[in-house]
Image (tube, grey):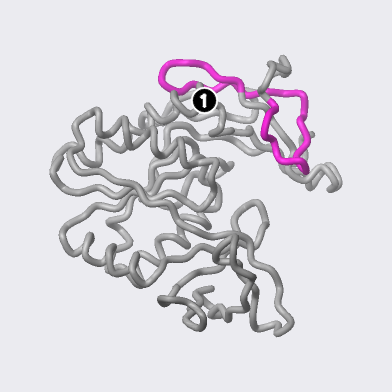
Amino acid sequence: MYSVEGTRIYTAQDQQPGKRIEGLLKDIPENYQYTGFDLNVRFNQKTFPLPIVTVNPQEPINKRLSIAWFNPLRPDLAKAAAADMANIGWEMVKNDLYRPVLIVVPPTEKSLELSLQTMRNLSDKGAKEISAFKFSGGIFQPAEDKRQVTVQLDKDQPAIPVTPDRQTGIFRVTEGQRQEIIGICYQPVTGKNKFLYLTEKQIADFNEFIKNNGRVIFNEDVVNTGATIKAMRQLFVNFCGAEAADIQTVAAAFEGNRPCSDPTVHYAIWLPEWIGKF
């Protein structure tokens, strides 16, 4: 392990045999496979073992990808990571504490508590006007018409067909809805076909917020390809009046074997990937 510009960076050589600590493997996706190795990382001056898991164990070994599993549902891990994330966010807001801040969270439930804890920490540090917004979204499915996909906007509603733009993935829904919905289809590193969306009212509210000098900060647990961040940013820039460079992202970790190419993404630790190792 070594440090560059304050970010704790871990390498593939930092792995060590796992101790199978009780609860460590909880909530690992069913299709992931534990390698028997852990990676010890530090958040808020405390050490946490992250289990190294293979995300595609069915593939030949030379094509297998393994990662250190950061589970934001682990209360002790989330609490420590949120402290470091708040320190990063504080550097963004400390010079203008009365500028409103909106913490934006991806659709997944697992990251919500981590983001809320980060927000509370920022408030405790002195941020005066801070609130949170969690995107809605889900997994889209193929439709009979190959130009379309089906999305379920609400658990109580049936899935409906939409037509995403071939270049941007953006779609609009008006029929049968009380207000227009603008969404975007994207594919994160998990390979799942996901979408997220904003309602007409949310878009109007965020336009007003940004017009009044509001600051938007995305919160993520782990950033890899940045597909989710790009999708959220695209909606805020295209429809809410935000400037792309003004939207910063605070994450617990960046994951990859090359430096993060997005200068607006800030993270506490840098995790490696293991390719063809396990």
Residue 87 at least partly seen: no
At a point 81% along the width and 44% down the height, the residue shown is 62
Residue 82 among magenta residues: no
**Towards the viewer: 25 or 89:** 25
The picture quadrant where one finds residue 27 is top right
Q: Quadrant of residue 203?
A: bottom left
Q: In this figure, which residue is indicated by the disc labeled 1?
A: 75
Q: Residue furthest front?
A: 156
Instruction: Give SS at disc 1.
Output: helix
Magenta range is 25-49
> x and y percent of residue 33 in the render?
78, 35
- 111 vs 52, nearest the viewer: 111
Q: Is residue 167 above or below residue 187?
A: below
Q: Residue at x 21, y 55 (%)?
A: 214
Q: Position of residue 156 (x, y in %)?
A: 59, 63
| Residue in the picture at 40% in, 68% down | 199
Q: Can residue 116 be seen in this snapshot?
A: yes
Residue 270 image point, x, y percent: 50, 35
Q: Is residue 218 left or right of residue 160?
A: left
Predominant secondary structure, magenta span? strand
User: Which residue appears at 69% of the width and 16% of the height?
Assistant: 21
Q: Is residue 32 magenta?
A: yes
From the viewer's perspective, tell me whether residue 209 is left or right of residue 266.
Answer: left
Tag 1: amino acid: Pro
User: In this orientation, which residue lies closer to the viewer: 250 or 275?
Assistant: 250
